[in-house]
């Protein structure tokens, strides 16, 4: 892998931001619907291939947004889908994988294959939806059963209307290896380092990152900047060090969508980041130091405001604004519900 060319997420004039936001929301909504449609077909006994939707068009739309520096599509990966987490997990890992894929300089068609592999990487879980969201500790037998989703997913790939091709061979390999870890402690093959396809390494890392940053029925989420820090400090034997570095560089220290408190006491949401100044993102400030809604809200670039800086990232659901409606709005920020 050559030195990653990191693209700035969100180098967008603020006047264009509403249209960026609207397009990101449309594409994210389509991606969630597609994931839901695919899983619903695969959950059935017949798994009718004719009813299966091939998500390539959605992957291309996500890629286009990322190439344009649309940070809103990345911010949306903070969301969870309320019915089953997998319907949001799958689009999220596709978006994050593509983000990293572009940062390491993948060509368009390779990036499409990577995005598809990420989107289809959990197909086999369609047979185990209940087990995948069991709120209590799994027994050894349940855990063994859940791990079979990798092989099952590879078989399910054949249900889609995709002729044998180089792309299909890569998809098969990436899907079958995305739970392998460079330490050799992954499954099903216990493969090590270079034996694992680079796309499988990317998807495996994004799968872990997405899982940790989202609430699951058995545990709460961890904020993205803490997961990034943990990956840098503790996960070097599981994930490729260069890949971790590229990911941190492309998401930045406070990824788009992160809620932050400034030294002024004001609270805002990271709108976009700059790889050159990872601690000085652009922030949309909506709450003042006293906990009141800021009217009008304002957007500032911390790189152009030398006296202002981020004190810490905050959990938006734990903020205590004076306006109860703002409190509700903030709690809704981590959910993906149509119309919210
Ligand atoms: Fe998986």
Image (cartoon, rainbow, N blue to C red):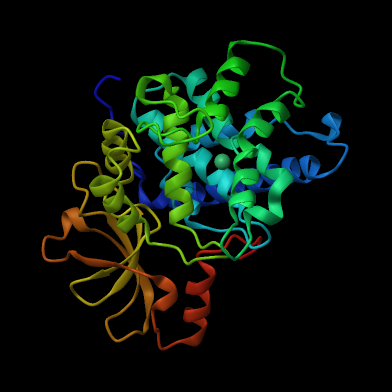
> In this image, 291 relative to 78: left or right?
left
Depth check, front residue: 219 or 315? 219
Q: Position of residue 216 (x, y in %)?
A: 54, 61
Give the residue at x 27% y 27%.
4
Depth check, front residue: 272 or 206? 206
- Tell me if residue 207 can be seen: yes
Give the residue at x 41% y 71%.
316
Locate residue 107: give its quadrant: top left
Please state the quadrant of the image where ligand 1 appears: top right
- How many numbered markers are drawn? 0
Locate residue 315: give its quadrant: bottom left
Q: Position of residue 190 (x, y in %)?
A: 46, 30
Outermost residue toward the top in this view: 165
Outermost residue toward the front in this view: 140
Give the residue at x 71% y 27%.
155
Q: Position of residue 158 (x, y in %)?
A: 73, 23
Give the residue at x 49% y 58%.
214
Locate residue 221: give its quadrant: bottom left
> In this image, 73 relative to 45: left or right?
left
> In this image, 275 relative to 39: left or right?
left
Q: Position of residue 149 (x, y in %)?
A: 64, 39
Q: Quadrant of the N terminus?
A: top left
Q: Is residue 157 above or below residue 40?
A: above
């Amino acid at each position: 892998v050559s030195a990653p060319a990191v693209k700035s997420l969100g180098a967008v004039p603020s006047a264009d931001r509403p249209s960026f936001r609207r397009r990101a929301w449309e594409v994210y909504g389509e991606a969630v619907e597609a994931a839901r449609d695919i899983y619903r077909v695969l959950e059935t006994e017949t798994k009718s291939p004719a009813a299966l939707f091939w998500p390539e068009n959605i992957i291309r739309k996500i890629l286009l947004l990322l190439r344009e520096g649309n940070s809103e599509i990345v911010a949306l990966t903070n969301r969870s889908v309320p019915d089953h987490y997998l319907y949001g997990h799958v689009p999220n890992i596709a978006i994050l994988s593509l983000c990293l894929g572009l940062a390491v300089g993948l060509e368009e068609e390779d990036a499409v294959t990577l995005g598809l592999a990420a989107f289809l990487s959990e197909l086999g879980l369609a047979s185990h939806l209940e087990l995948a969201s069991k709120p209590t500790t799994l027994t050894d037998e349940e855990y063994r059963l859940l791990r079979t989703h990798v092989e099952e997913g590879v078989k399910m790939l054949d249900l889609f209307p995709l002729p044998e091709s180089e792309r299909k061979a890569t998809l098969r390999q990436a899907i079958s290896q995305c739970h392998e870890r460079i330490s050799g402690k992954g499954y099903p093959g216990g493969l090590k380092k270079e034996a694992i396809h680079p796309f499988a390494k990317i998807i495996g890392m994004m799968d872990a990152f997405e899982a940790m940053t989202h609430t699951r029925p058995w545990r709460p989420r961890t904020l993205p900047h803490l997961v990034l820090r943990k990956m840098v400090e503790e996960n070097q034997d599981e994930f490729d060090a260069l890949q971790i570095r590229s990911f941190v560089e492309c998401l930045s220290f406070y990824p788009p969508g992160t809620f932050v408190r400034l030294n002024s006491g004001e609270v805002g949401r990271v709108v976009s980041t700059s790889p050159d100044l990872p601690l000085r993102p652009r922030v949309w400030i909506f709450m003042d130091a006293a906990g009141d809604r800021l009217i009008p809200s304002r957007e500032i670039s911390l790189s152009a405001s030398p006296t202002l800086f981020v004190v810490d990232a905050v959990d938006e659901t734990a903020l205590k604004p004076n306006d109860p409606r703002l409190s509700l709005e903030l709690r809704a920020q981590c959910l993906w519900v149509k119309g919210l």
